[in-house]
Image (cartoon, rainbow, N blue to C red):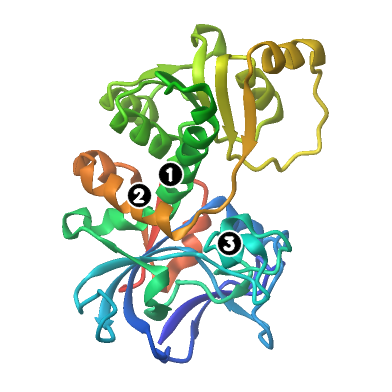
């Protein structure tokens, strides 16, 4: 079968490879790969900033954002052939540490987890793949190709989970949220905020085009400057831009929570008013939390959120599709939100 393969650190050697057919072990599903999504993590792998090949391999199958259709399912698995599914990315460490033993490998303490398409395991970028039933999440049929958004939606589902957990100490719920960045993560975070009935504000630098249109279609407010953003009860920071990260935290009101999702790729220094930041957090009982990866429960929350969403709105997030036969073209610069690779072409 065909697969999109890479050797981390060799961006000039991106291939469509002939790859061994998967063998579904006891308790595993055999899945027809339909789509995978491209994200910044894939670029980090290609450029060698994340370098963890599966043991004994000199190449790996790329992509962790998946959508597939079940071909074979074991009895009692809860799945049947024809189901749309997404694969959970992270697997617990073999020891395991306390979080992994509790089914929360997204909080792994020792770093010995593995991740499909990222760390130590082949990804989902192949015509067929196998997955243990407990690491597959069923998607509603009406979601269709937008099911490829399940993994990034699970990331923001975890962010909202963190807001709920930290916010519970204040005996209140947020009413107003700021999302920084109108990429796929930011837009999906805004979607879940709207589904929660909150007043949603989204900050981005793009003045015209699909990003502000998608935000306004959610009945959310689009901003080009933090100066126009009111004080908020929660922030979900999706850009990793250092100055914006700190400035957005200063928008926190009393008892508010900021969750940082964006990864910084720059070591540049920035001027920072430590006293103002300290006072915002201390006098305001405010909290800043980092969040990475997601648990199977967050994938299930994501599946529910995608099923509830306006499907026309979701489809607009996938701005470009590239066939597997030409998958390196997905890396070409375009004004995209989400690029999907069609594994059937």
Q: Secondary structure at mark 3?
A: helix
Residue 105 numbered mark, or none? 3
Q: Is residue 149 above or below residue 259?
A: below
Residue 157 numbered mark, or none? 1
The answer to whether residue 338 is left or right of residue 328 is left
Residue 10: x, y in percent?
69, 69
Tag in front: 3 or 1:
3
Q: Can residue 180 be spotted in the picture?
A: no
The answer to whether residue 54 is left or right of residue 307 is right
Q: Quadrant of the N terminus?
A: bottom left
Q: CA distance from mark 3 to mark 1?
A: 16 Å
Residue 301 numbered mark, or none? 2
The answer to whether residue 29 is left or right of residue 82 is right
Instruction: Give the residue displayed 21% in from the left and 58% down from the top.
Output: 140
Asked whether disc 1 touches disc 2, contact meaning CB atoms under 8 Å apart, the reply is yes
Disc 3 or 2, which lies upstream in sequence?
3
Residue 41: x, y in percent?
59, 55
How crowded is the residue under tag 2: few (<14 C-alpha within 10 Å), some, or many (20+)?
Answer: many
Residues 334 and 295: in front is 295
Q: Is residue 156 above or below residue 26?
A: above
């Amino acid at each position: 079968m065909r697969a999109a393969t890479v050797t981390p650190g060799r961006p000039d050697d991106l291939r469509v490879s002939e790859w061994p057919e998967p063998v579904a072990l006891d308790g595993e599903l055999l899945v027809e790969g339909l789509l995978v999504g491209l994200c910044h993590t894939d670029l980090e792998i290609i450029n060698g900033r994340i370098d963890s090949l599966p043991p004994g391999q000199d190449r790996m199958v790329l992509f962790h954002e998946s959508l597939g259709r079940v071909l074979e399912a074991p009895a009692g698995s809860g799945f049947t052939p024809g189901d749309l599914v997404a694969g959970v990315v992270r697997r617990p460490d073999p020891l395991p540490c306390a979080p992994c033993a509790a089914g929360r490998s997204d909080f792994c303490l020792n770093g010995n987890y593995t991740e499909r398409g990222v760390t130590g395991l082949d990804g989902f970028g192949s015509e067929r793949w196998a997955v243990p039933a407990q690491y597959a999440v069923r998607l509603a049929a009406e979601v269709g190709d937008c099911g490829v958004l399940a993994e990034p939606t699970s990331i923001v589902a975890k962010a909202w989970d963190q807001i709920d957990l930290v916010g519970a100490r204040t005996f209140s719920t947020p009413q107003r949220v700021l999302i920084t960045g109108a990429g796929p993560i930011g837009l999906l975070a805004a979607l879940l905020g709207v589904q929660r009935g909150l007043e949603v504000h989204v900050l981005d630098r793009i003045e015209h085009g699909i990003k502000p249109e998608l935000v306004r279609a959610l009945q959310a407010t689009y901003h080009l400057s933090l100066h126009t953003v009111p004080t908020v009860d929660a922030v979900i920071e999706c850009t990793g831009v250092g100055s914006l990260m700190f400035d957005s935290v200063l928008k926190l009101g009393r008892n508010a929570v900021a969750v940082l999702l964006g990864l910084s790729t720059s070591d540049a220094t920035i001027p920072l008013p430590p006293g103002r930041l300290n006072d915002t957090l201390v006098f305001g009982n405010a909290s800043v939390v980092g969040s990475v990866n997601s648990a199977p429960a967050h994938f299930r929350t994501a599946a529910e959120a995608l099923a509830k969403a306006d499907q026309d709105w979701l489809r607009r997030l996938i701005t470009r599709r590239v066939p597997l036969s030409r998958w390196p073209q997905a890396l070409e610069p375009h004004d995209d939100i989400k690029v999907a690779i069609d594994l059937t072409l």
